[in-house]
Image (spheres, helix red, strand yellow):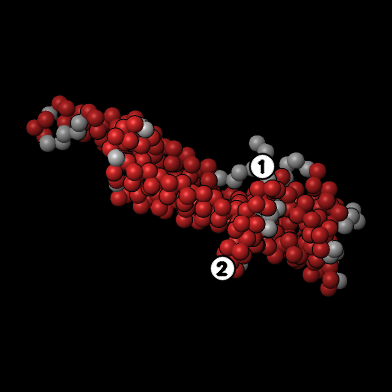
Amino acid sequence: MTEFSDFCYTVFGPLGRTLFRLHRGLEDNIDAANMKIHPEIYLSMILFFSTVASAIIAATFALFWVFTSNVDMLFLFAPFSLLIYLVWSSPIGGFALILVPFVILVIGLSIPSLKASNRISGLRNEIPYASMHMSVMASGGLNPYVSLLRLKNVDLLPKLREEIERIQGLILSSGCDPVSAMEKAAKVIGLKEYKDLLLGYASTLRTGGDVLHYLYAQTNAMFRNMATRIKGMGESMGALMEAYSIVEILGGLGLYMMFIIGFSLPEAGMTLSPETFFIFSFAVMPMVSVVFLFLSDTLQINYPVS
């Protein structure tokens, strides 16, 4: 992997630096996603894959040109040649192939933000328990940073463990003190609870305030917000299930009645072919069920360990 990234940076380094100047927010997203790679190297790798895709598409277009000028070669290399001919002979297929390198570039630029969003979603569920642990340890006289380090060995909080490793990496790489490293780490993560916990702790410590009281108050507020969020999720799940009942049960019964009436009384004008009824019953309705299952899984709280 190191040799491959070195090769990409050697060939596409100048283009990667130019693209990085146009997307300054990418560095924060890579840091928040805990991707241990420099932004310019990452962009160079994306440009490499986009260039390879462009070369392959250009080669298929050249083959299409050869096949159209010599029909005998079209059948000589079938079915590969027929597939290339069918795709490029269609305006939609050719336009879709031309867009592939740009799609690769867009997806590559979006991956860090998507991974960062996934980490933030996991941290949102783990931060209240980390705050509770820090409060209990602080009441016994243990430094909050040291109590965070102890959470590194807890398997129940995997996202927080990655974040603690990132804070340790900041301390070792920049030589800053633990409080400054915690501040720097919190500023990158776009999570309010996480920022309030670490930035508030650092501010309280520097101003000489009561750190223990702040941690207690922050933990209480976090669990109250979590209870409110879970209640809102329950209401959203109820509305989603009502929508599923309307679409699946009422819609299915209505279409079934139309099929029965059209089959029994063709003169009624409510005809529904058996093919349409089969597609709706065994293709459309299962797909709708899968969509609702995905939405319900997205809405609920996903704990790290089940």
Asked whether the viewer can see residue 83, the reply is yes
Q: Quadrant of residue 186?
A: bottom right
| Amino acid type at mark 1 | Pro
Crowd rating for badge 1 (residues with CA inside 10 Å; few <14, some 14–19, many 20+)? some
Q: Which residue is found at the position 73% from the left and 49% from the top?
A: 162
Of residues 30 and 91, which is closer to you in this image?
A: 91
Q: Secondary structure at mark 1?
A: loop
Q: Secondary structure at mark 2?
A: helix
Q: Which residue is found at the position 81% from the left and 43% from the top?
A: 153
| Amino acid type at mark 2 | Leu
Image quarter of the C terminus: top right
Residue at the spot of label 1: 304
Q: Quadrant of residue 254?
A: top left
Residue 268 lies, in percent from the top left, at: 11, 34
Residue 87 lies, in percent from the top left, at: 34, 43
Query: Mark on residue 209?
Result: none
Work out which residue is located at the far right of the displayed protein and give it: 141
**Going by the image, does 145 lie left or right of 249?**
right
As drawn, 103 above or below 198: above
Crowd rating for badge 2 (residues with CA inside 10 Å; few <14, some 14–19, many 20+)? few
Q: Quadrant of residue 245?
A: top left
Residue at the spot of label 2: 22
Of residues 251 and 65, which is closer to you in this image?
A: 65
Q: Which residue is found at the position 79% from the left and 59% from the top?
A: 170
**Going by the image, does 44 lie left or right of 196?**
left
Asked whether the viewer can see residue 32, the reply is no
Residue 5 lies, in percent from the top left, at: 66, 51
Residue 25 lies, in percent from the top left, at: 60, 65
